[in-house]
Amino acid sequence: MSDAVESLMAELLARTPGEAPFHQAVREVAESVQLVLDRRPELRKAKVLERMIEPERAILFRVPWVDDSGEVQVNRGIRVGMNSAIGPYKGGLRFHPTVSLGLLKFLAFEQVFKNALTTLPLGGGKGGSDFDPKGKSDMEVMRFCQSYMTELYRHIGPRTDVPAGDIGVGGREIGFLFGQYKRIRNEFAGVLTGKSVTWGGSLIRPEATGYGSVYFAAEMLKTRNQTLDGKVCLVSGSGNVAQYTAEKLIELGAKVVTLSDSSGYVYDEAGIDPEKLEWVKELKNERRGRIAEYADAFDSAVFTPRDPSADSNPLWGHSADCAFPSATQNEINEADARALIAGGVYLVSEGANMPTTAEGTRVFLDEKILYGPGKAANAGGVAVSGLEMSQNSLRLSWTREEVDQRLHGIMESIHAQCVATAEEFGTPGNYVNGANIGGFLKVADAMLAQGVV
Ligand code: NDP
């Protein structure tokens, strides 16, 4: 490995101990962009990469709230503004007990490159809280969101920072957050995306990340003159991204055989059809139940509980053609990656952010499968968030068909950009380099033009 990467990483580890996912994300990008820095010494001299790995700002705040039994609860709120060279900070909010500053720095860092790849004027940020919405009543979630926004409102705005949803933050939470912002600021502004269509949201925003990941997969298959029709697909997760990934796959003729949550996964050998998927949406979005119930409802399905002591996930061991990890970070390790290859998988399109460990990624690259990394394959969500911002500014709403067409066009263009960039830098077919370098160049040139800020 190059000396430049090793010394960058040594310094980063010393400055930011305990932020493992952030280190993992930085190392991957640093390795890819050495190819650029060797050709563009002015970027090295201006320490563009060194500046990119330091957040422009990170805000930590207390979020006190009162639960249904009258007890006071205290959570931590965080918002990281990673880079605003090409636009206001943009990126989701995650509510999950594992949220920490290091986790959000990794997500904000990934977001910078992803947003640049969409070709929209969006900087990168991410935020969230260690609050766990699971098992909370609607009123508890509302009180938490109101308290969260009571601090966050000072730091965001349509031209400064525009948050969206992520794990644990869907339509319900965005509604409560938006209501509180509007009340405090006395203005109806496009300050959050993922809003409901009746009050400023965009059609296709809920579907965008999942649909986009499938469009990206279809583009990758096109390079081998194939389509998704008839392909057997493994999908993980059962939240927003997984649901709409499955929906678009089924629509394009693929057979989806798995879904999961943090308690385990279901394997349905008959395939998940549109009626079963509607059942899952109701289970997860309305009843907020567990995926295990799917196996009780449908005879063709088997539920396997998660074994926390196991060093691999049996979901990835089923025979299939394509895999769409759509749950969380590092859900595919080296053993899982090898199991996927052994089971016949030759396409992986990442709906989740960094779902594959560094070792797993190496397996995919060595095997030369069609491997679409998250920052390219799941960029459809933020792309339609960008379109939602445009519609808010224009004060109009595009039709479902128009937004879907734009989303499709953006995913095609991200794919083309990855392919062309990977080739230009001597690594044809390597979408990881294509995405990292493509995103980096756009942000790096803007930073160079704007001076040392
Ligand atoms: P949701 O909260 O809607 O769903 C998350 C799903 O992943 C749930 O099924 C959840 O199960 C499962 N999950 C979460 N954490 C874990 C864990 N630690 N172990 C196992 N399973 C877990 O989130 P989204 O669908 O929005 O997000 C999924 C992924 O996609 C994330 O990586 C997110 O960053 C990424 N992403 C999302 C975008 C969006 O537009 N929403 C845009 C781009 C990327 P359980 O309910 O049991 O926790």
Image (cartoon, rainbow, N blue to C red):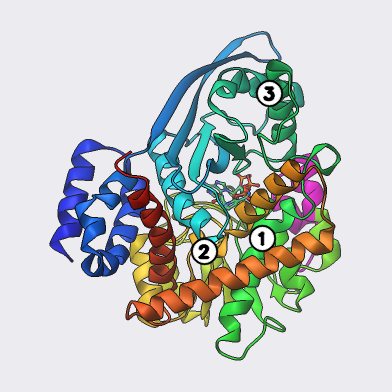
Q: Residue at x 75, y 28 (%)?
A: 188
Q: Is residue 76 magenta?
A: no
The disc labelled 3 sits on which kind of residue? Tyr
Q: Quadrant of residue 241?
A: bottom right
Q: Tag on residue 376?
A: 2
- Asked whether 73 or 292 is in front, the reply is 73
**Helix, strand or loop for disc 1:** helix
Q: Residue at x 70, y 21 (%)?
A: 180
- Residue numbers of the magenta segment: 280-302
The disc labelled 2 sits on which kind of residue? Ala
Q: Which residue was labeled with disc 1?
A: 210
**Helix, strand or loop for disc 3:** helix
Residue 255 location (% of width, % of height): 72, 76
- Residue 152 sits above or below residue 348 on the image: above
* In the displayed structure image, the side of residue 101 where residue 284 appears, left or right: right
Residue 140 location (% of width, % of height): 70, 21
* In the displayed structure image, the side of residue 203 where residue 213 appears, left or right: left
| Sequence-earlier tag: 3 or 2 | 3
Q: Quadrant of residue 439?
A: bottom left
